[in-house]
Amino acid sequence: MPVQLEAAAERARARIGTLLKQKWRLDKVIGVGGMAVVYAATHRNKKRAAIKMLHPELSSDATIRERFLREGYVANSVGQKGAVTVDDDDVTEDGLAYLVMELLDGETIEQRWERKGRLLSPHEALSVADQILDTLAAAHARGIVHRDLKPENMFLTRDGAVKILDFGIARVRELARSEAPPGSSSPLTTTQAGSTMGTPAFMAPEQARGRWDDVDGRTDLWSLGATLYTLLTGEFVHKGETVNETLALAVTRPASSLGELRTDLHPALIRFVDKALAYDRAARFNDAATMQHALRVAYAEMEGHDVANAPQLQVPDLESIPSSRAVTLRNLTTGRGVTASEQPTAISIWHSHWRWFALAGALGFLILVFLLFRGGDKAATAASPVPSESAAAVSSSNAAPPVSVVAPELKPVPLDELPAEHRRTWHADGTKRPASGPPHKASGDPFARRQ
C-alpha cells in the first residue's frame, strides 16, 4: 500500500532513543523514503551503523518483507568496496524488518552538484564515473543490474571514495504499488514502482518501455551516461514536465548530443557521453570495463596525451587481479600508457620506453668512441688496462630502466570543506533528506524532493 511520507517521518521521530532487540539505540533519523526510514544508530558495544527499517505498510506484506531482507544482501554479493555493505538483518518487536548497514559520512553526488551551482567540472564528473564503473563491472559480472543509477544514489565519502547506494532495492520496489499518493515525492527523480520501475529522468529507452527482458548492464551504462549529461549541463536528457511526458520522450526520442548544450567541451568527452546515451543498446559500450577504458582514453585526449598505443582494456579477473592493477586517471595525466596486463610484451615495452632505449644506446656509443680514442694514445697505453671496466660500462649503460606495471591508485577528487548543512551522515533510501528538515515545495525543478 502507498506510504504517506509525512506520517512515516512522524513515526520515525517517535522511535528516536528506543532500543532494537536490546542492542541498537536509534540516535536520529537521517532519511525517510518511499520504502524505508534510515536511522543513525549505536550498538551496545559502541559501534555505529545505519539502520534501514521497512515502513509498517510494507512490512505487513510477508512477500515484500522477506524479499527486503534477502535483497538487502545484494550489495554484499557485488564484492567491491564501491557497494555499501550490509552487516545484519532482523525484525523489530512490532514486526518491522530492518537492515544494519555501513554508515557513510559525506554527501551524495546530487547534493554536491547542487552545492556547486548544478555544474561539475569534466575532471570531477569523470572521476566519479570512473569509480562507479569499477563497481558496475563487479556487479554485472555477477549478474546484478542496479536499474536505478542517478546522482542521488551515488555517495562521495570524505576520503574521496564513491559508493553506489540502493543495490537490490529496485527489485523490491517491483512488488510495491506503482501509484504513489499525490504530493508524496518529486516525480521525475523518484523511483517509480511496478511496470515503470526506475527513475524517469535517468531511464534508458528499454527500461521506459517496461521491457524487462531487454534490461541488462547496458541499461545501467545508459543511466551513467545520463548522469554525466546532467552533471555537466545542469539539464536532464529528456525535459518532460510530468512523469508520463518524460517516459514518452525516453521511449520515442533518442538523446540529444552533449555538444548541443556544451560546445566548449572537448570532442572526445562529447563522443564518449553520446555513445553511452545511444538509443540502440548495441550501439552503446558493450560492458562497464569497455566504457571505463574509453573514459580514460577520452580523458587522456582531453589532457593532450598520446594514447595511440594504448591496448584495449581486457575484462579483469575480479577474484585475482587487485584493484591497483587497473589504469587510473592519474596514469594518463602523468603521461603513462594504458596497460591491463601484469606481464607486458616486448613490443609494448618498446613502444612505451623507446626513448629510454635510444638514450641508453647513444650513451653507450659515445662511451665506446671515447674509449677507442683513448686506446690510441700512447700515454693511455701505459695506464692500467681499461677493457674490462669499459665493457661493464657499456653493458650497464645499455640496460633499460626497470618497467613498472603496477598503476598507481586513482587520486581521489579533492573534497571541499563541506558546509555545516552537509556535515551529517547519509545513507541510501529514495528521498534522502533528514526528517527534521523543511519539506520542499512543489516546483518545476525535477530534482526537488518532498517529505
Image: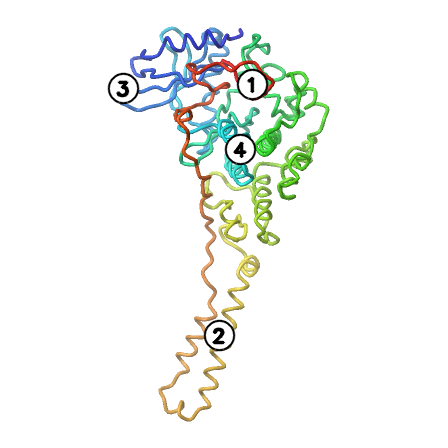
Q: Residue at x 41, y 31 (%)?
A: 418
Q: CA distance from mark 2 to mark 4?
A: 50 Å
Q: Residues within 10 Å of mark 1 (few under 14, many from 20)?
A: many
**Residue for badge 1:** 190
Q: Secondary structure at mark 3?
A: loop
The numbered dot on residue 65 is: none
**Residue for badge 4:** 136
Which one is in front in this view, the residue at disc 4 or the one at disc 1?
A: 1
Q: CA distance from mark 4 to mark 3?
A: 35 Å
Q: Secondary structure at mark 4?
A: helix
The kind of residue on which mark 4 rests is Leu
Residue 324 location (% of width, % of height): 45, 44
Residue 312 location (% of width, % of height): 59, 47
**Residue for badge 3:** 44
Instruction: From the viewer's side, name the closer residue of 41 and 407.
Output: 41
Residue 332 location (% of width, % of height): 53, 49
Q: Indicate the quadrant where residue 122 lies.
A: top right
The kind of residue on which mark 1 rests is Thr
**Residue for badge 2:** 364
Q: Residues within 10 Å of mark 2 (few under 14, many from 20)?
A: many
- Contact between labelled residues 1 and 4, with CB atoms less than 8 Å apart: no
